[in-house]
Amino acid sequence: MNNKVLLLKGWVVGIQNVEEWRERTIKIIINLINKNKINTIAWDGDLLQEDSFTSIIPELLLKKKKLKLIIFKKKSSVYKLLTPGFSETDEYGNFMQNFNFKNINFKVVPIDESKILNEKGKTDFLKLGLEGYKYIKKYLNNKIIVARMGMGYIAKKEFEAVENNENKEYPKIIIIDIPTVRKMNDKIETFGMDNMNNNNINNTNLFRRKRKLGIIGIKQLNTFKKYLELL
């Protein structure tokens, strides 16, 4: 398992000042890739959307064409990623579409619905996210970096589960929180804003420093300042 994995997590709608945010975020992601020799990007199968964290992916692939993509998607929705030109509008009016995977090394990992349905027979996105972690540990690597670009209730529960890791099902992770602002229902939400003025991540090799960080399970790095104090 020689895959150096960067797992992307974030808000899928409502990111503000998206062009400026995207430019800054891509620089951070590229630095993470270069410093840690990342060769694999993974995420939970969210489609391309203008104000989503997924909007960084096309430009990221232009800059790093040799990256391998691992995309987790419930089995019945895999076609959305494999059908060229696919697009849809959700019940809230949000338009989303497929990515252009031409000449890209990618794999869509279908997640069986029986593993991720709740008691009402609907998709449990917490379970879906955790199935992704299980796959990563089993087939890719036991130590990964997670870049978070926003976090809601389900994501918080997901990280709690990974932190507890009672059955040793999930990989050890290093978390990097990327400053992100979104607007939902006329309410402004901020995430990772304490990191806004610190660019020292440019000089950070996270994989080589994992021993010094003393990571066991999950290591919450809420600000780059706190992170640098651990080095």
Image (cartoon, rainbow, N blue to C red):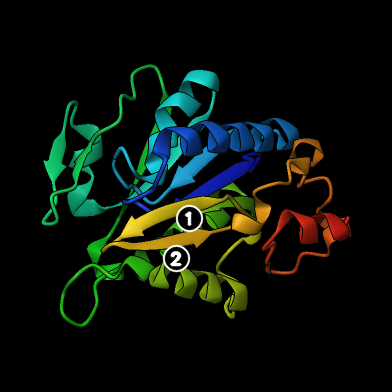
Dot 1 or dot 2, earlier in sequence: 2
Left-right relation of 21 to 86: right
Left-right relation of 46 to 177: left
Residue 231 in view, yes or no? yes
Please name the amino acid that badge 1 sits on.
Answer: Tyr
Residue 221 percent coordinates (x, y) = 70, 62
Residue 27 or 73: which is nearer the viewer?
27
Residue 194 percent coordinates (x, y) = 66, 58
Q: Report the quarter where the N terminus lies.
A: top right
Q: Which residue is mark 2?
A: 130
Residue 27 percent coordinates (x, y) = 61, 31
Q: Write down the quadrant of residue 168 in the picture.
A: bottom right
Real-space Cα separation, disc 1 to disc 2, in angstroms: 9 Å
Q: Write down the quadrant of residue 119 in the picture.
A: bottom left
Residue at 37% x, 69% y is: 127
- Above or below for 18 versus 229: above
Left-right relation of 73 to 168: left
Residue at 72% x, 38% y is: 36
Q: Which residue is mark 1?
A: 135
- Above or below for 148 versus 57: below
Label 1 secondary element: helix
Left-right relation of 226 to 2: right
